[in-house]
Amino acid sequence: NKVLNNIDIPGGQYKITMSHSGSRNFAIWFYEDGEAYGDLLVNEIGVYSGAAVLRDGDQGPSQNAQFEVTASGSWKIVIERVSGTTTTNIKGSGTKVSGYFVGNGKRNTVDIKYSGSHNFVVIVYSILGYDALLANEIGSYSGQVTYYTYEGIEYFFSVQSAGSWTVDFNL
């Protein structure tokens, strides 16, 4: 177990990529600037590789942040800005943080599919700091939700999954 102290993170949108090679629990808690409660970024058993949103952009800089890592084997974390662009129809597996896409000023029908037996979560974020939970399911799922994207505003999304998935914003 390890605590990483005095981590400075500039304002903006950030993701964290995490990996673990152990056979038991791997968990990472993130605490900002002396907050009493933190964000659980990952809590998995065994070998793991994935990404999560660390900061969605509605906060200013974070100074003196902490990470509390519980791991039974070697581990690695990489913090980087959300970057790049993405199409609005993405297929993948496991956990992922997308690049940016630009809203069209309309309410869009989002098609979401997941093949797996574990929890499946899709969250969309805007650079304005707004976020929305689009899916939170256990087991395979196929469905639609609506989501309004403001014209010219950049968005990105995260998927937490143990199986294969498709997210299509139909922009």
Image (cartoon, rainbow, N blue to C red):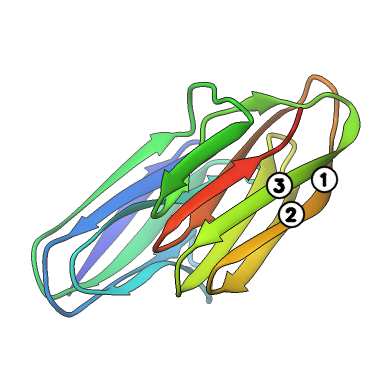
Nearest to the eye among marks 2 and 3: give it: 3
Which residue does the image show at 55% across and 68% down from the upper left? 140
Q: Secondary structure at mark 3?
A: strand
Identify residue type, mark 3.
Asp
Q: Earlier in the sequence, mark 3 or mark 1?
A: 3
Residue beneath disc 3: 111
Please, what secondary structure does the residue beneath circle 1 have? Answer: strand
- Label 2: how many Cα within 10 Å (few below 14, some 14–19, many 20+): few
Q: Which residue is mark 1?
A: 147
Label 1 Cα crowd, 10 Å radius (few <14 / some 14-19 / many 20+): some
Image-based side of 106 in relation to 62, left or right: right
- Compare residues 36 and 165 and report the one nearer the observer: 165
The answer for how far apart the CA atoms under marks 1 and 2 are is 8 Å
Query: Going by the picture, which residue comes out furthest to the right?
Result: 106
On the image, the x and y values in percent for residue 48 come to 24, 61
Q: Is residue 84 above or below residue 65?
A: above
Between 89 and 99, the residue placed more toward the observer is 89
The disc, 1 or 2, on the residue closer to the chain's N-terminal end is 2
Q: Is residue 54 above or below residue 136?
A: above
Q: CA distance from mark 2 to mark 3?
A: 15 Å
- Viewer can see residue 56: no
